[in-house]
Image (cartoon, rainbow, N blue to C red):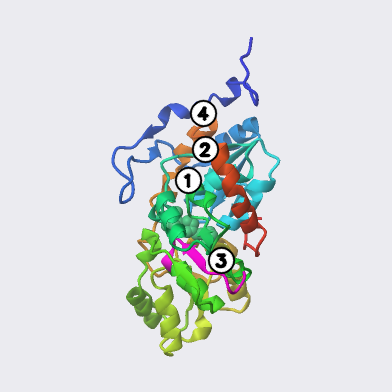
Amino acid sequence: MTVTTTLQTLDELDSPLLSAVHRAPGHVGPDGPVGRWEGIDGNEDWADEIRRLKTARNAVILAHNYELPEIQDIADHTGDSLALSRIAAETDADVIVFCGVHFMAETAKILSPDKTVLIPDAEAGCSLADSLTETELAEWKAEHPDALVVSYINTTAAVKGLTDVCCTSSNAVDVVAGLPADKEILFGPDQFLGAHVRRETGRDNIHVWAGECHVHAGISGPELARRAEENPDADLFIHPECGCANSAIYLAGEGVIDPERVHMLSTGEMLTSAKVASDAGRGKVLVATEVGMLHQLRGVAPDVDFAPVNERAACPYMKMITPAALLRCLALGADEVDVAPDVAEKARQAVERMIAVGNPGGGE
Ligand code: 13P
Ligand code: SF4
């Protein structure tokens, strides 16, 4: 007799490739606890097996724009945080496989509590999400009892539970602009995105948490200035989490960089702007964000020369989602992401308010 689970026979999930999968020794990232899942190349045999297992589980594969190229290419949808959250909220699939970092999979679970949400490696964290804890936010709120809390999606579910409205980089300005002008706002955890929001909305009643993403903070102002000087005709696509974001605006204000060349964009908006750059016959674009983005940009506008401002800006957590990790995930149904129902309940309204605002670029 065949043993069955609720979704599929166990035979169907038996993969001949699984025996090669192993944890590599070593540490990933500044505090990464373990090495990556390795042992399999992202070749055609692997891709066939991923598609077969995905069908057996009735799963949808979502990938963030910072994932490895082979993960982006096998995904059903590749996009920015907002686009992927919206898909996670609406999918008919039984299983959501989130190729991204842990807070993204948690957000999918908050939005779709009845679905099984899997992440190929639960160790894929985020230094930015780690920079604001639930306790710290509770204390900050106690100092400003009348303020509204706006939290970036790059936060834990517990932090979202103490939040009035979440945002992503593509709708942070619209989210804040939509709140009553006389209300104090606590914005966290990213200081560079917070400065961008303060600048764009012109509000001076925003308190910004001093957190940062170690990858984006490492894309510095002096590096941007040097690269812009070397490439005087290139456009600049800058993610607002970058350490160089303030410098870019300053240099544009001082006339050192032509303000027309400077574009502050979420990863999804970069894809929309890449098509515009291509249509306008632009030759070169310098890209200030995580380097995984270049794969999508080169795909949508192959005639434009996209070059990283900092080629070492690779997120070690995003890169934990390897071909081996994805195979293991689909074959074993691991790692499952759960959010305690009371925490999810508290966080849901803030996340639903987030997905109601703005237009994500790409992915949908
Ligand atoms: P977006 O995809 O929303 O631009 O976010 C970037 C990011 O930092 C994810 O880690
Ligand atoms: Fe977090 Fe930065 Fe990695 Fe994005 S790039 S997942 S913000 S550590």
Counting from the top left corner in percent of width and height, residue 145 is at 50, 61
Residue at figure coordinates x 54%, y 55% from the top left: 163
Question: Is residue 287 or residue 222 the one in the foreground?
Answer: 222
State which mark lies toward you, 3 or 1: 3
Question: Is residue 203 or residue 61 the one in the foreground?
Answer: 203
What type is the residue that disc 4 sits on? Leu
Q: Which residues are magenta?
A: 180-191
Residue 172: assigned label: 3
Counting from the top left corner in percent of width and height, residue 93 is at 67, 38
Name the residue that disc number 1 marks. Answer: 102
The mark that comes first in sequence, 2 or 3, is 3
Q: Secondary structure at mark 4?
A: helix
Name the residue that disc number 2 marks. Answer: 337
Residue 35: assigned label: none
The mark that comes first in sequence, 2 or 4, is 4
Q: Secondary structure at mark 1?
A: helix
Q: Residues within 10 Å of mark 1 (few under 14, many from 20)?
A: many
State which mark lies toward you, 3 or 4: 3
What type is the residue that disc 1 sits on? His
Q: Residue furthest left?
A: 26
Q: Secondary structure at mark 3?
A: helix
Q: Give the vertical position of 275 relative to 106 (above or below).
A: below
Residue at figure coordinates x 66%, y 47% from the top left: 89
Q: Residues within 10 Å of mark 4 (few under 14, many from 20)?
A: some
